[in-house]
Image (tube, helix red, strand yellow):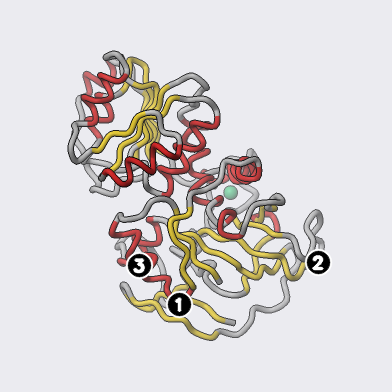
Amino acid sequence: MRALQLVSDRQLELVELPDPPAPAAGEVQLRMRAVALNHIDVWGWRGMAFAKRKLPLVVGAEAAGEIVALGEGVTGLAVGDPVVAYGALTCGVCRACREGRDNLCENVGGIMGFHVDGFARDLVNMPARLVIPVPEGVSWGEAACAPIAFGTVEHMLFDNARLEPGETILVHAGGSGIGTAAIRLAKAIGATVITTVGDDEKAEKAAALGADHVINYNTDRFEHRVRRLTGKTGVDVVFEHVGPDTWNGSLLSLKRGGRLVTCGSTTGVSAQMNLYQLFQQQLRIFGSFGCRMANIADALKKMAAGTRPVIDTEFDVAEFDRGLERLESRKVFGKIVVRL
Ligand SMILES: [Zn+2]
């Protein structure tokens, strides 16, 4: 089978590897169809020092594929079923796993495509408990955006920030993969969405996606605009993933008792903040990483019902690094999908 391996920093190679063995008891074998790209892929490709991993490493952290073989004792799944896979190798037995809080697993064995071999290969054997069926009407490329992008946003908006219909949310970087997902998922429940983008072309696209107000952060101080747009009260929720460049403006954009949820920090690791503001304004800050498997199933249901991912570009597997470069350059609007 073909597999796309990271062999050294920024070096990918499409290689031939032996097919995996028949799936063991409790496993399924998947023929992968599409991989979607995320910033975690860019970190891995650049060689982020914190990741314990061995090279060569098969890349691809979120993906969709078709079941081609079932191991002994697998029930509820059939050959031919389209599925997505949960890419963190959870233990399935700790308290967090048993309670469905999969991303808090106490014995997680690594993230596929980042710490251990990922999905950019023709065939993968997976524990059947980590696959989630894809409903009818969702394409391979769309389904591939569920396990990380849409799942993460579901978890941020609805488990952590508990966004409610009628509330107002500020979504940073509305043209990014998760930004576009956040705009769509927040609008779908009837929230008012303010979003930031870096240029006028993206501003038009974000408005077309349904954002109620779009701010170009290169020409306007977003926190001032947000306060004006909300009659000086601020928003209920800020959806953060930018980091130091926006952190203090994000806190200033919140109303009293507002919630900030963050899943990323693309502009650096440290920020200073005003602690008086934190407690006097009774702000709540949520760190969010990954999602529960149930968030992915919910995301797929919403996709089937019409809340679809925005696909920026599709590449062939041999052009995976072109996709990473495009993501790194921030010229994207929506998700990048790689076909297998
Ligand atoms: Zn566990």
The answer, for residue 96, to whether it is visible in the render is: no
Residue 7, horizontal then vertical, whole percent? 38, 78
Quarter of the image holding residue 220? top left
Residue at (42, 56) in percent of width and height: 38
Q: Which amino acid, by three-letter code, is at mark 1?
A: Ala
- Residue 187 lies, with reference to residue 298, above or below; the image says above
Q: Quadrant of the N terminus?
A: bottom right
Q: What residue is disc 2 on?
A: 72
SS for callout 3? helix
Q: Nearer the viewer, residue 304 or 99?
A: 304
Residue at (39, 33) in percent of width and height: 261
Q: Quadrant of the C terminus?
A: bottom right
| Mark 2 beta carbon near ligand 1 (under 8 Å) | no
Q: What residue is disc 1 on?
A: 318
Q: Earlier in the sequence, mark 3 or mark 2?
A: 3
**Mark 3, other Cα within 10 Å: few <14 / some 14–19 / many ≥20:** many
Q: What residue is disc 3 on?
A: 45
**Mark 1, other Cα within 10 Å: few <14 / some 14–19 / many ≥20:** some
Q: Which amino acid, by three-letter code, is at mark 2?
A: Glu
SS for callout 2? loop
Q: Which amino acid, by three-letter code, is at mark 3?
A: Trp
- Residue 294 lies, with reference to residue 232, above or below; the image says below
Q: Earlier in the sequence, mark 1 or mark 3?
A: 3
**Mark 2, other Cα within 10 Å: few <14 / some 14–19 / many ≥20:** few
- Residue 53 lies, with reference to residue 160, above or below; the image says below
- Give the CA distance from mark 2 to mark 1: 34 Å
- Residue 121 lies, with reference to residue 135, above or below; the image says below
SS for callout 1? helix
